[in-house]
Image (cartoon, rainbow, N blue to C red):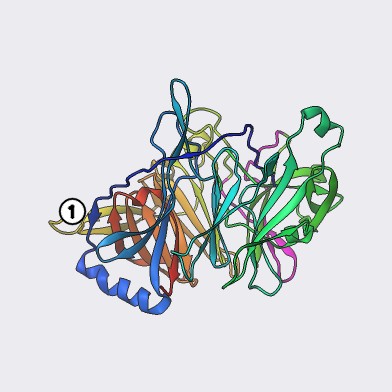
Protein backbone atom coordinates (compact mmCIF):
# COMPACT_ATOMS: atom_id res chain seq x y z
CA UNK A 1 0.00 0.00 0.00
CA UNK A 2 2.49 2.53 -1.20
CA UNK A 3 2.11 6.09 -2.48
CA UNK A 4 5.54 7.70 -2.52
CA UNK A 5 6.76 11.26 -2.71
CA UNK A 6 9.88 11.80 -4.77
CA UNK A 7 11.43 14.88 -3.20
CA UNK A 8 11.53 16.84 0.03
CA UNK A 9 9.74 20.18 0.08
CA UNK A 10 9.34 23.05 2.49
CA UNK A 11 5.93 24.52 3.29
CA UNK A 12 5.44 28.28 3.61
CA UNK A 13 1.89 29.03 4.82
CA UNK A 14 0.18 32.02 3.27
CA UNK A 15 -3.26 33.36 3.95
CA UNK A 16 -5.83 32.71 1.26
CA UNK A 17 -9.17 34.44 1.36
CA UNK A 18 -11.98 32.15 0.23
CA UNK A 19 -14.91 33.99 -1.28
CA UNK A 20 -18.12 32.07 -1.77
CA UNK A 21 -21.33 33.17 -3.44
CA UNK A 22 -24.02 31.76 -1.20
CA UNK A 23 -27.44 30.90 -2.55
CA UNK A 24 -30.42 30.12 -0.36
CA UNK A 25 -32.11 26.74 -0.49
CA UNK A 26 -35.72 26.94 -1.73
CA UNK A 27 -38.52 26.54 0.78
CA UNK A 28 -39.38 23.09 -0.60
CA UNK A 29 -36.07 21.74 0.74
CA UNK A 30 -36.12 23.45 4.13
CA UNK A 31 -38.36 20.82 5.73
CA UNK A 32 -36.04 18.04 4.58
CA UNK A 33 -32.98 19.78 6.03
CA UNK A 34 -34.81 20.16 9.33
CA UNK A 35 -35.84 16.48 9.25
CA UNK A 36 -32.28 15.35 8.59
CA UNK A 37 -30.93 17.62 11.30
CA UNK A 38 -33.30 16.23 13.92
CA UNK A 39 -32.49 12.63 12.94
CA UNK A 40 -28.70 12.80 12.75
CA UNK A 41 -27.62 16.25 13.86
CA UNK A 42 -26.30 19.02 11.67
CA UNK A 43 -24.91 18.29 8.20
CA UNK A 44 -21.25 19.21 7.60
CA UNK A 45 -19.26 19.01 4.36
CA UNK A 46 -15.53 19.29 3.72
CA UNK A 47 -14.17 21.08 0.65
CA UNK A 48 -10.64 20.38 -0.56
CA UNK A 49 -8.64 19.13 -3.54
CA UNK A 50 -6.45 16.02 -3.31
CA UNK A 51 -5.23 16.14 -6.91
CA UNK A 52 -1.73 17.29 -7.82
CA UNK A 53 -1.55 21.10 -7.73
CA UNK A 54 -1.02 22.95 -11.00
CA UNK A 55 2.12 25.08 -11.22
CA UNK A 56 1.60 28.84 -10.82
CA UNK A 57 -2.03 28.33 -9.76
CA UNK A 58 -3.62 29.54 -6.55
CA UNK A 59 -3.40 27.08 -3.66
CA UNK A 60 -6.67 25.51 -2.53
CA UNK A 61 -7.53 25.69 1.17
CA UNK A 62 -9.34 22.89 2.98
CA UNK A 63 -12.50 24.29 4.55
CA UNK A 64 -15.19 22.76 6.77
CA UNK A 65 -18.71 24.01 6.09
CA UNK A 66 -22.07 23.59 7.72
CA UNK A 67 -25.07 23.13 5.42
CA UNK A 68 -28.10 25.25 6.20
CA UNK A 69 -31.09 26.72 4.40
CA UNK A 70 -28.79 29.69 3.60
CA UNK A 71 -26.29 27.49 1.77
CA UNK A 72 -22.75 26.68 2.96
CA UNK A 73 -21.54 28.39 6.14
CA UNK A 74 -17.79 28.31 6.86
CA UNK A 75 -17.07 26.65 10.21
CA UNK A 76 -13.29 26.19 10.17
CA UNK A 77 -10.28 26.49 7.86
CA UNK A 78 -8.69 23.06 8.28
CA UNK A 79 -5.61 23.81 6.18
CA UNK A 80 -4.75 27.11 4.55
CA UNK A 81 -3.39 27.09 1.03
CA UNK A 82 0.39 27.32 0.78
CA UNK A 83 2.97 27.56 -1.99
CA UNK A 84 6.60 26.59 -2.55
CA UNK A 85 8.26 29.57 -4.19
CA UNK A 86 10.96 29.28 -6.83
CA UNK A 87 13.04 31.78 -8.75
CA UNK A 88 10.50 32.28 -11.54
CA UNK A 89 7.37 30.47 -10.42
CA UNK A 90 5.63 28.74 -7.55
CA UNK A 91 4.07 25.38 -6.84
CA UNK A 92 0.92 25.22 -4.70
CA UNK A 93 0.87 22.67 -1.89
CA UNK A 94 -2.32 21.02 -0.73
CA UNK A 95 -3.48 17.90 1.06
CA UNK A 96 -2.31 14.44 0.07
CA UNK A 97 -5.33 12.41 1.11
CA UNK A 98 -8.56 12.66 3.09
CA UNK A 99 -10.41 9.56 4.24
CA UNK A 100 -13.33 8.90 6.54
CA UNK A 101 -12.10 6.40 9.13
CA UNK A 102 -14.66 5.57 11.80
CA UNK A 103 -16.02 8.82 13.21
CA UNK A 104 -13.04 10.84 11.98
CA UNK A 105 -11.94 12.50 8.75
CA UNK A 106 -8.19 11.98 8.55
CA UNK A 107 -6.34 14.64 6.54
CA UNK A 108 -2.76 13.89 5.45
CA UNK A 109 -0.63 16.70 4.05
CA UNK A 110 1.18 18.24 2.21
CA UNK A 111 0.64 16.71 -1.22
CA UNK A 112 4.12 15.81 -2.44
CA UNK A 113 5.92 14.75 0.74
CA UNK A 114 3.30 14.02 3.42
CA UNK A 115 4.51 14.69 6.94
CA UNK A 116 1.48 15.48 9.03
CA UNK A 117 -2.06 14.47 9.88
CA UNK A 118 -5.16 16.37 11.04
CA UNK A 119 -8.02 14.61 12.84
CA UNK A 120 -11.50 16.03 12.28
CA UNK A 121 -13.81 14.40 14.83
CA UNK A 122 -17.32 14.16 13.43
CA UNK A 123 -18.78 14.50 16.93
CA UNK A 124 -16.88 17.79 17.51
CA UNK A 125 -15.77 18.87 14.02
CA UNK A 126 -14.41 22.34 14.83
CA UNK A 127 -11.95 20.99 17.43
CA UNK A 128 -9.13 20.10 15.02
CA UNK A 129 -6.09 18.15 16.20
CA UNK A 130 -2.86 18.15 14.19
CA UNK A 131 0.19 15.88 14.54
CA UNK A 132 3.55 15.92 12.78
CA UNK A 133 4.21 12.24 12.06
CA UNK A 134 7.41 12.12 10.01
CA UNK A 135 10.57 13.10 11.93
CA UNK A 136 13.58 14.75 10.34
CA UNK A 137 15.66 12.40 8.23
CA UNK A 138 12.75 10.12 7.32
CA UNK A 139 10.01 9.93 4.71
CA UNK A 140 6.53 8.47 4.84
CA UNK A 141 5.14 5.81 2.46
CA UNK A 142 1.38 5.83 2.71
CA UNK A 143 -1.83 6.42 0.79
CA UNK A 144 -4.37 7.47 3.40
CA UNK A 145 -4.83 4.13 5.13
CA UNK A 146 -6.42 3.90 8.54
CA UNK A 147 -7.09 1.15 11.04
CA UNK A 148 -9.66 0.49 13.75
CA UNK A 149 -8.96 -0.90 17.21
CA UNK A 150 -10.56 -4.10 18.48
CA UNK A 151 -12.72 -2.17 20.95
CA UNK A 152 -14.00 0.13 18.16
CA UNK A 153 -13.10 3.28 20.10
CA UNK A 154 -9.59 3.60 18.63
CA UNK A 155 -9.08 5.07 15.15
CA UNK A 156 -5.59 5.24 13.63
CA UNK A 157 -3.80 6.70 10.63
CA UNK A 158 -1.08 4.31 9.39
CA UNK A 159 2.32 5.69 8.37
CA UNK A 160 5.13 3.43 7.15
CA UNK A 161 8.37 5.39 7.58
CA UNK A 162 11.87 4.80 6.23
CA UNK A 163 15.11 6.80 6.60
CA UNK A 164 16.31 8.84 3.66
CA UNK A 165 18.63 6.47 1.79
CA UNK A 166 20.33 5.92 -1.53
CA UNK A 167 18.76 3.50 -4.06
CA UNK A 168 21.80 1.25 -3.52
CA UNK A 169 21.09 0.89 0.20
CA UNK A 170 17.46 0.12 -0.53
CA UNK A 171 18.41 -2.49 -3.12
CA UNK A 172 20.84 -4.12 -0.68
CA UNK A 173 18.16 -4.44 1.98
CA UNK A 174 19.99 -2.24 4.47
CA UNK A 175 16.91 -0.18 5.19
CA UNK A 176 13.92 -1.38 7.19
CA UNK A 177 10.62 0.42 7.57
CA UNK A 178 8.95 1.32 10.84
CA UNK A 179 5.23 1.77 11.41
CA UNK A 180 3.76 4.74 13.24
CA UNK A 181 0.06 4.29 14.02
CA UNK A 182 -1.21 7.77 14.93
CA UNK A 183 -4.33 7.05 16.93
CA UNK A 184 -7.30 8.85 18.45
CA UNK A 185 -9.86 7.95 21.07
CA UNK A 186 -12.78 10.17 22.07
CA UNK A 187 -11.70 12.67 24.70
CA UNK A 188 -7.98 11.87 24.36
CA UNK A 189 -5.14 13.61 22.57
CA UNK A 190 -3.62 11.81 19.56
CA UNK A 191 -0.94 9.27 20.49
CA UNK A 192 1.58 7.13 18.58
CA UNK A 193 1.91 3.34 18.65
CA UNK A 194 5.07 2.02 16.97
CA UNK A 195 5.48 -1.18 14.95
CA UNK A 196 2.04 -2.64 15.63
CA UNK A 197 2.07 -4.40 12.28
CA UNK A 198 -1.20 -6.22 12.94
CA UNK A 199 -2.93 -2.88 12.27
CA UNK A 200 -2.70 -3.77 8.58
CA UNK A 201 -5.08 -6.68 9.20
CA UNK A 202 -7.83 -4.20 10.13
CA UNK A 203 -7.30 -1.69 7.33
CA UNK A 204 -9.93 1.03 6.90
CA UNK A 205 -9.97 2.99 3.64
CA UNK A 206 -12.95 4.75 2.08
CA UNK A 207 -11.31 4.57 -1.35
CA UNK A 208 -10.63 8.19 -2.25
CA UNK A 209 -7.01 8.81 -3.33
CA UNK A 210 -5.36 11.19 -5.79
CA UNK A 211 -5.81 9.95 -9.35
CA UNK A 212 -2.03 9.52 -9.67
CA UNK A 213 -1.80 7.35 -6.52
CA UNK A 214 -3.24 4.02 -5.43
CA UNK A 215 -2.92 1.58 -2.52
CA UNK A 216 -1.41 -1.84 -3.15
CA UNK A 217 -1.11 -5.28 -1.58
CA UNK A 218 0.41 -8.48 -3.01
CA UNK A 219 -0.72 -12.03 -3.57
CA UNK A 220 1.57 -15.00 -3.02
CA UNK A 221 0.89 -18.67 -2.31
CA UNK A 222 -2.84 -18.10 -2.00
CA UNK A 223 -2.53 -15.25 0.52
CA UNK A 224 -2.83 -11.47 0.37
CA UNK A 225 0.03 -9.72 2.11
CA UNK A 226 1.17 -6.21 2.93
CA UNK A 227 4.76 -6.00 1.72
CA UNK A 228 7.19 -3.95 3.81
CA UNK A 229 10.68 -2.62 3.18
CA UNK A 230 13.28 -4.76 4.94
CA UNK A 231 10.68 -6.74 6.90
CA UNK A 232 8.59 -9.88 6.56
CA UNK A 233 5.20 -9.40 4.89
CA UNK A 234 2.07 -9.05 7.01
CA UNK A 235 -0.55 -11.67 6.10
CA UNK A 236 -3.95 -9.99 5.68
CA UNK A 237 -6.32 -12.60 4.23
CA UNK A 238 -6.63 -15.36 1.64
CA UNK A 239 -6.97 -14.81 -2.09
CA UNK A 240 -10.31 -15.30 -3.84
CA UNK A 241 -10.49 -18.72 -5.48
CA UNK A 242 -12.20 -17.48 -8.67
CA UNK A 243 -9.03 -15.96 -10.12
CA UNK A 244 -6.80 -16.75 -13.11
CA UNK A 245 -3.97 -19.18 -12.36
CA UNK A 246 -1.44 -16.55 -13.49
CA UNK A 247 -2.15 -14.34 -10.48
CA UNK A 248 -0.52 -16.61 -7.88
CA UNK A 249 2.00 -13.81 -7.40
CA UNK A 250 0.61 -10.46 -8.45
CA UNK A 251 0.16 -6.90 -7.33
CA UNK A 252 -3.36 -6.08 -6.18
CA UNK A 253 -5.08 -2.72 -5.88
CA UNK A 254 -6.86 -2.11 -2.61
CA UNK A 255 -9.92 -0.17 -3.76
CA UNK A 256 -11.68 0.19 -0.39
CA UNK A 257 -12.10 -1.48 3.00
CA UNK A 258 -14.17 -1.05 6.13
CA UNK A 259 -15.19 -3.23 9.05
CA UNK A 260 -17.62 -5.17 6.84
CA UNK A 261 -16.08 -5.49 3.38
CA UNK A 262 -12.76 -5.45 1.53
CA UNK A 263 -12.62 -4.60 -2.19
CA UNK A 264 -9.59 -5.49 -4.33
CA UNK A 265 -8.72 -5.42 -8.02
CA UNK A 266 -6.11 -7.75 -9.53
CA UNK A 267 -3.57 -5.85 -11.61
CA UNK A 268 -2.59 -7.07 -15.04
CA UNK A 269 0.88 -8.09 -16.21
CA UNK A 270 1.51 -4.39 -16.92
CA UNK A 271 0.84 -3.55 -13.22
CA UNK A 272 -2.36 -1.71 -14.14
CA UNK A 273 -5.78 -2.48 -12.67
CA UNK A 274 -8.03 -3.02 -15.70
CA UNK A 275 -11.15 -3.50 -13.52
CA UNK A 276 -11.70 -6.91 -15.10
CA UNK A 277 -10.95 -8.90 -11.92
CA UNK A 278 -12.54 -7.04 -9.01
CA UNK A 279 -13.56 -8.96 -5.88
CA UNK A 280 -15.40 -8.15 -2.65
CA UNK A 281 -14.73 -10.03 0.58
CA UNK A 282 -17.35 -10.18 3.34
CA UNK A 283 -15.22 -10.00 6.49
CA UNK A 284 -17.77 -11.74 8.71
CA UNK A 285 -17.32 -15.05 6.87
CA UNK A 286 -14.21 -14.44 4.74
CA UNK A 287 -16.04 -15.26 1.50
CA UNK A 288 -15.22 -13.52 -1.78
CA UNK A 289 -17.39 -12.77 -4.78
CA UNK A 290 -16.64 -11.19 -8.14
CA UNK A 291 -17.99 -7.69 -8.78
CA UNK A 292 -18.94 -6.98 -12.43
CA UNK A 293 -17.79 -3.36 -12.62
CA UNK A 294 -17.22 -1.58 -15.91
CA UNK A 295 -13.96 -2.92 -17.44
CA UNK A 296 -12.15 0.37 -17.90
CA UNK A 297 -8.43 1.10 -17.72
CA UNK A 298 -6.32 4.23 -18.08
CA UNK A 299 -6.88 5.70 -21.51
CA UNK A 300 -3.24 6.75 -21.80
CA UNK A 301 -3.97 9.99 -23.64
CA UNK A 302 -5.10 13.43 -22.57
CA UNK A 303 -7.42 14.29 -20.95
CA UNK A 304 -7.75 10.84 -19.37
CA UNK A 305 -4.12 9.83 -18.87
CA UNK A 306 -4.65 9.91 -15.10
CA UNK A 307 -8.36 9.08 -15.25
CA UNK A 308 -9.45 5.80 -13.67
CA UNK A 309 -12.44 4.05 -12.18
CA UNK A 310 -13.18 5.62 -8.80
CA UNK A 311 -14.32 3.62 -5.75
CA UNK A 312 -15.96 4.86 -2.53
CA UNK A 313 -17.27 2.64 0.27
CA UNK A 314 -20.05 3.80 2.63
CA UNK A 315 -21.08 1.02 5.05
CA UNK A 316 -22.85 -1.58 2.82
CA UNK A 317 -22.77 0.62 -0.29
CA UNK A 318 -19.85 0.63 -2.72
CA UNK A 319 -19.98 3.42 -5.30
CA UNK A 320 -18.09 3.16 -8.60
CA UNK A 321 -17.74 6.06 -11.02
CA UNK A 322 -16.25 6.47 -14.49
CA UNK A 323 -16.07 9.60 -16.62
CA UNK A 324 -17.58 9.88 -20.08
CA UNK A 325 -14.10 10.34 -21.56
CA UNK A 326 -12.86 7.15 -19.93
CA UNK A 327 -15.89 5.22 -21.13
CA UNK A 328 -15.40 6.48 -24.68
CA UNK A 329 -11.70 5.61 -24.65
CA UNK A 330 -12.56 2.04 -23.59
CA UNK A 331 -15.53 1.64 -25.97
CA UNK A 332 -17.89 0.77 -23.11
CA UNK A 333 -21.37 -0.22 -24.28
CA UNK A 334 -22.71 -1.86 -21.12
CA UNK A 335 -26.25 -3.26 -21.38
CA UNK A 336 -27.60 -2.09 -18.02
CA UNK A 337 -30.36 0.53 -18.33
CA UNK A 338 -29.60 3.65 -16.32
CA UNK A 339 -31.53 6.54 -14.85
CA UNK A 340 -30.27 9.69 -16.58
CA UNK A 341 -30.20 12.68 -14.22
CA UNK A 342 -30.27 16.29 -15.35
CA UNK A 343 -30.72 19.49 -13.34
CA UNK A 344 -33.72 21.56 -14.45
CA UNK A 345 -35.14 24.90 -13.41
CA UNK A 346 -38.54 24.81 -11.70
CA UNK A 347 -39.18 28.52 -11.11
CA UNK A 348 -38.05 32.04 -11.83
CA UNK A 349 -35.27 32.18 -9.23
CA UNK A 350 -31.81 30.86 -9.99
CA UNK A 351 -32.01 28.40 -7.12
CA UNK A 352 -35.39 26.93 -8.07
CA UNK A 353 -33.79 23.68 -9.19
CA UNK A 354 -34.74 20.01 -9.30
CA UNK A 355 -33.41 16.75 -10.73
CA UNK A 356 -35.18 15.34 -13.77
CA UNK A 357 -34.97 11.53 -14.03
CA UNK A 358 -35.28 9.78 -17.40
CA UNK A 359 -35.08 6.04 -17.97
CA UNK A 360 -32.88 5.42 -21.00
CA UNK A 361 -32.36 2.26 -23.00
CA UNK A 362 -28.88 0.78 -23.18
CA UNK A 363 -28.03 2.08 -26.71
CA UNK A 364 -29.09 5.61 -25.75
CA UNK A 365 -26.98 5.59 -22.58
CA UNK A 366 -23.96 4.23 -24.42
CA UNK A 367 -24.06 7.19 -26.81
CA UNK A 368 -24.69 9.78 -24.09
CA UNK A 369 -21.60 11.76 -22.97
CA UNK A 370 -22.24 11.17 -19.28
CA UNK A 371 -20.49 10.08 -16.11
CA UNK A 372 -21.62 6.60 -15.11
CA UNK A 373 -22.17 5.99 -11.40
CA UNK A 374 -23.23 2.67 -9.88
CA UNK A 375 -24.22 2.03 -6.28
CA UNK A 376 -23.66 -1.61 -5.26
CA UNK A 377 -25.18 -2.92 -2.04
CA UNK A 378 -22.58 -5.48 -0.98
CA UNK A 379 -24.89 -7.00 1.65
CA UNK A 380 -27.98 -7.82 -0.42
CA UNK A 381 -26.88 -7.44 -4.06
CA UNK A 382 -28.97 -4.41 -5.04
CA UNK A 383 -27.59 -2.23 -7.85
CA UNK A 384 -28.52 1.35 -8.77
CA UNK A 385 -27.21 2.76 -12.08
CA UNK A 386 -27.04 6.45 -12.88
CA UNK A 387 -25.85 8.43 -15.91
CA UNK A 388 -25.21 12.13 -15.34
CA UNK A 389 -24.44 14.41 -18.32
CA UNK A 390 -22.65 16.82 -15.96
CA UNK A 391 -19.23 15.14 -15.75
CA UNK A 392 -18.28 16.85 -12.50
CA UNK A 393 -20.64 14.71 -10.43
CA UNK A 394 -20.27 12.20 -7.60
CA UNK A 395 -21.92 10.48 -4.67
CA UNK A 396 -20.53 12.36 -1.66
CA UNK A 397 -22.03 10.06 0.97
CA UNK A 398 -24.63 7.38 1.69
CA UNK A 399 -26.27 7.79 5.10
CA UNK A 400 -27.94 5.02 7.10
CA UNK A 401 -28.48 2.75 4.09
CA UNK A 402 -31.26 5.00 2.79
CA UNK A 403 -30.17 8.53 1.97
CA UNK A 404 -27.72 9.60 -0.75
CA UNK A 405 -25.99 12.98 -0.90
CA UNK A 406 -25.25 13.61 -4.58
CA UNK A 407 -23.08 16.42 -5.92
CA UNK A 408 -23.77 17.69 -9.44
CA UNK A 409 -21.10 20.33 -10.03
CA UNK A 410 -21.99 23.23 -7.69
CA UNK A 411 -25.20 21.73 -6.29
CA UNK A 412 -25.90 19.17 -3.57
CA UNK A 413 -29.03 17.02 -3.72
CA UNK A 414 -30.49 14.53 -1.29
CA UNK A 415 -32.13 11.39 -2.68
CA UNK A 416 -33.84 8.48 -0.97
CA UNK A 417 -32.95 4.84 -1.71
CA UNK A 418 -36.12 2.92 -2.46
CA UNK A 419 -35.34 -0.65 -3.43
CA UNK A 420 -33.05 -0.44 -6.46
CA UNK A 421 -33.88 3.16 -7.34
CA UNK A 422 -33.18 6.67 -6.11
CA UNK A 423 -36.19 8.90 -5.64
CA UNK A 424 -37.43 12.09 -3.98
CA UNK A 425 -34.52 14.33 -5.06
CA UNK A 426 -34.29 17.55 -3.03
CA UNK A 427 -31.85 20.44 -3.40
CA UNK A 428 -29.73 20.73 -0.24
CA UNK A 429 -27.32 23.54 -1.23
CA UNK A 430 -26.17 25.60 -4.21
CA UNK A 431 -22.82 27.32 -3.72
CA UNK A 432 -19.63 28.24 -5.58
CA UNK A 433 -17.55 26.21 -3.06
CA UNK A 434 -19.45 22.96 -3.72
CA UNK A 435 -17.27 21.73 -6.65
CA UNK A 436 -14.54 21.04 -4.06
CA UNK A 437 -16.90 19.19 -1.68
CA UNK A 438 -16.14 15.44 -1.55
CA UNK A 439 -16.88 14.48 2.08
CA UNK A 440 -19.94 14.84 4.32
CA UNK A 441 -21.14 13.75 7.76
CA UNK A 442 -23.76 14.47 10.39
CA UNK A 443 -22.63 15.87 13.73
CA UNK A 444 -24.50 16.49 17.00
CA UNK A 445 -22.97 19.99 17.01
Residue reaching furthest left? Answer: 348
Q: Does residue 68 belong to the magenta stretch?
A: no
How busy is the neighbourhood of tag 1: few (under 14 within 10 Å), some, or many (20 plus)?
A: few
Q: Is residue 114 above or below residue 349?
A: above
Residue visible at 71% across and 72% down? 150
The answer, for residue 318, to whether it is visible in the render is: no
- 239 is higher (above) or lower (below) than 68: above
**Considering depth in this image, is 364 or 48 the residue closer to the camera?**
48
Look at the magenta stretch and give its main secondary structure. Answer: loop
Choose top left, top right, bottom left or bottom right for residue 75. Answer: bottom left
Residue found at x 70% / y 36%: 271
Q: Position of residue 8 (x, y in %)?
A: 61, 34
Whether residue 86 can be seen here:
yes
Front-lying residue, 310 or 70: 70
Q: Badge 1 is on which residue?
A: 350
| 277 in magenta | yes
Q: Nearer the viewer, residue 105 or 33?
A: 105
Give the image location of residue 141, x and y in percent: 68, 44
Residue furthest toward the bottom?
Answer: 38
Q: Is residue 129 left or right of residue 259?
A: left
Is residue 135 shown above or below 65?
above
Residue segment shown in magenta:
270-294
Q: x%, y% of residue 303?
A: 46, 31
Q: Tell whether 375 sits left or right of 423.
A: right
Q: Label 1's element?
A: loop
Whether residue 395 sits left or right of residue 269 in the image: it is: left
Amino acid sequence: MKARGQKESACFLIYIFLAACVHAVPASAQADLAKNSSAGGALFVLASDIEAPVQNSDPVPTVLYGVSTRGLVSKAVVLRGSSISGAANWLPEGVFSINEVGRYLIVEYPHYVPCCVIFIAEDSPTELESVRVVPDGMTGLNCGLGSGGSDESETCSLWELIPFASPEMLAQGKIASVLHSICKRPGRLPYTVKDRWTDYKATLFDGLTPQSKQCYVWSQNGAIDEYLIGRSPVAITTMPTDTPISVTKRRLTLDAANGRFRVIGIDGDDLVDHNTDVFVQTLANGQWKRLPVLPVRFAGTDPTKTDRMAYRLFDDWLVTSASAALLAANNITEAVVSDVLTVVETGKQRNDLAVKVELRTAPDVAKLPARRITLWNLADGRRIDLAIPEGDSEVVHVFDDRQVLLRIHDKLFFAEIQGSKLSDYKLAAFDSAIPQVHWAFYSPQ
